[in-house]
Image (cartoon, rainbow, N blue to C red):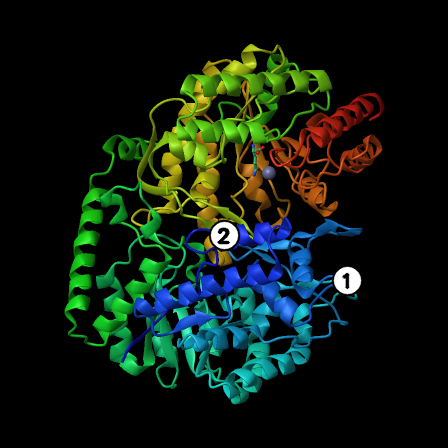
Amino acid sequence: MVLSSVLGFPRIGANREVKKAVEAYWGGKLSAEELTKVAAETKTASWTSLKERGVDLIPSGEFSLYDHVLDHSAAFNVIPKRYVGLGLSPLDVFFAMGRGRQADGVDVPACEMKKWFDSNYHYVVPELSEETDFKLLYNKALLEYNEAKALGITTRPVVLGPVSYLVLGKAAKEASTGFQPISLLPKILPVYKKLLSELKAAGVESVQIDEPVLVLDRAADLDKQYATAYAELVPVAPKLVLTTYFARLDTNISFIAKLPVAGLHIDLIRAPGQLDEVIAAIKSTPVVLSLGVVSGRNIWKADFAAAIKQGQKAIAALGADRVIIATSSSVLHTPVTLASEKKLTAEQKDWFSFALEKAAEVATIASVLSGSQDAKVAAALEANKISIAKRREFEATSDDAVRKRVAAITPDMYNRKSPFATRKEVQAKHLNLPKFPTTTIGSFPQTKEIRTARAKLGKGEISEAEYDEFIKKEIEMVVRFQEKVGLDLLVHGEPERNDMVQYFGEQLKGFVFTQNGWVQSYGSRYVRPPIIVSDVSRDAPMTVKWSSYAQSVTKKPMKGMLSGPVTILNWSFPRDDVSRKLQSQQLALALRDEVIDLEKAGISAIQVDEPAIREGLPLRRSDWDEYLEWAVDTFKLSTAGVTDATQTHSHFCYSDFGDIFPSIQRLDADVISIEFSKSDMKLLQTFQQYGYSNQIGPGVYDIHSPRVPSEQEIIDRLKTTLSIIPDHLMFINPDCGLKTRGWKETEASLANLVAAARWARQNA
Ligand code: GLN
Ligand code: ZN
């Protein structure tokens, strides 16, 4: 019989109850017991619904109140010293590591967070050193397994594997130079042995052991570590299903196939082509193959026919007992259920599957492959066939005008009319900015008043006209403030934007929005990604009204503000019937029109933010060039339609440019602003080394903290920066937008920034 499995489930609860409870606990409005109760109820609801939908292998142990990697660190005693001895409960230590803590005389910053592979989920990075004293403080997988068992539900515990856990970690401050976290493998294995043998003793049949690092190029050098680890763990553990996701195993399969594990899970959504190769590699072993045929990363209904075909191929080679039908990864990256969507049309609802619907999908596909004669299964199969056909029909009615426009893109559309050196002179005259121009990244504090006004508009409590008046007042206030504090290149402050992607999605054709489609970004922060459902185009200008109003109330130059094509794409659920490249091209053409309209409206500087270009980078290096080519091209397509006199800007919230530097250069933005206040000089040296010749604004202070940087601190920062970046290329700006900041610190920080710029003009 073919079994079905779901690799992990959203933790938010169908009505965001976990998010709300966690935040209430932080706010002192809920006790730890009450929080635990909400968590238990949510887990119960998830397990029960998965069971009701017929899933055979139900996950446990992967639930988290913040992040599963953080849970793992907390359980394994990987707790940095700064959180120990503060008199906090284990739960508060856990949250302090996740988000920092500043109360009752305790003041500790959070641990570093990093993107979870190529997703928008962030994990808390384990800090490791020679001193790390791994201990199993509690067995979370076992606790949750027993919790489910008490409800009469048998689950398959999920454990993050030892090699991936260590590789995802970083060297702690106290580690000696050259320390590699993976060197701790011999020390961590005994703890894993204890964890797994406890599971075995409790009667657990099999464990999903996540080793996502196996899809990375660097896993090729970890073959020995993998061999050692699994040779030690397998004898004491329940059956281990080695679980990989997000990309292909590639040549790593040669050593993976030799590991003594009972099962292997592969992602056939991201890498459908790897099936033959993997089958061939494991055919002569007893390994069970788990086929990830239902996407854990996107919200489209699975195409049963395609999934069944892959299942049949695996069954023909391995036999039904050696095949599992699964989600491609945890469905953590999708919203809980379509059932909560009241505003989608019946046609739209028929296209999608969220986490719970995906659970039903794996169960149905597995039943079909097991030869089920059940009428319900037959009906589900038939219904899927009809849904998929309808979706294909809808896709076929593409917007011809948009398709033709993409087909007609010519190479010259990617390039500005003149090279940067020429543009720089024209722009200097046109914009008349001083030496070391000061500017900001776009947003100003999004106050409670702004959010209230937006909510009122949503509920129809104020009219569109009243809302517009309110926004205009906000803009004018932000402009006056910037004039007063003495900034040179102004912004309108983005008060009209709920979110830098949603705002554009709502105004473009081709997007659909959910009411309750929350997906975890980090901790209690959830986003509601828009869904791209068809060809994208722009009906009318999206930002011109606001930018030109802002320009009309000042004599200083105003910078227009847009989100770039790659960022809009990466922070949405993309279509799966056409390439990401095509979707990005369509977005770029829409943005190109906007950029040209802004220029026509008298806006002489236009910023197109691309903070997500880097996170969209494929996991396998051999796929980078192809991605970077279209990603950079589409950015250029969106910005290159203007005359030499218009200054284009772009912004990146990161600074690890080293490996993609040539692409940043190829963007050919007149000015780029980057995160720099927390980075070392290596970054600027990269710019120097590559002879970066356009203008650049390395962020001079960190906007993620309410801390006000002193004038002297900013001057010191500038001094180091100016030792590398030529004077005439320097802009002075903060690290990122100010929307999460309060006004008080914003005023003080920007005043110091302007003062530091004055110092630079006189002294540098
Ligand atoms: N212009 C945006 C802002 O200032 C940029 C946000 C971002 O980089 N994430 O808010
Ligand atoms: Zn940013």
**Residue 600 located left or right of residue 408:** right
SS at badge 2? strand
**Residue 758 located left or right of residue 190:** right
Quadrant of the picture in which ligand 1 is shown:
top right
Q: Residue at x 28, y 35 (%)?
A: 403
- The image shows residue 90 at horizontal and vertical percentages of 68, 65
Three-letter code for the amino acid on which mark 1 is drawn: Gly
Q: Nearer the viewer, mark 2 or mark 1?
A: 1
Three-letter code for the amino acid on which mark 2 is drawn: Gln
Q: Residues within 10 Å of mark 1 (few under 14, many from 20)?
A: few
Label 1 lies in ligand 2 vicinity (Cβ under 8 Å):
no
- The image shows residue 31 at horizontal and vertical percentages of 61, 57
- The image shows residue 634 at horizontal and vertical percentages of 44, 37
SS at badge 1? loop
Earlier sequence position, callout 2 versus callout 1: 1
Q: Residues within 10 Å of mark 2 (few under 14, many from 20)?
A: many
Q: Pointer 2 and pointer 1: residues touching (CB < 8 Å)? A: no
- Where is mark 2, residue-wise? 520
**Which quadrant holds residue 591?**
top left
Q: Name the quarter where the N terminus is drawn.
A: bottom left
Please determine whether, in this image, residue 19 is positioned above or below residue 448: below
Q: Is residue 29 visible?
A: yes
**Residue 378 located left or right of residue 239:** left
Tell me the CA gap for discs 2 and 1: 30 Å
Please determine whether, in this image, residue 409 is positioned above or below residue 80: above
- The image shows residue 529 at horizontal and vertical percentages of 43, 44
Q: Name the quarter where the C terminus is drawn.
A: top right
- Where is mark 1, residue-wise? 87
**Which quadrant holds residue 130?**
bottom right
Q: Residue at x 58, y 79 (%)?
A: 224
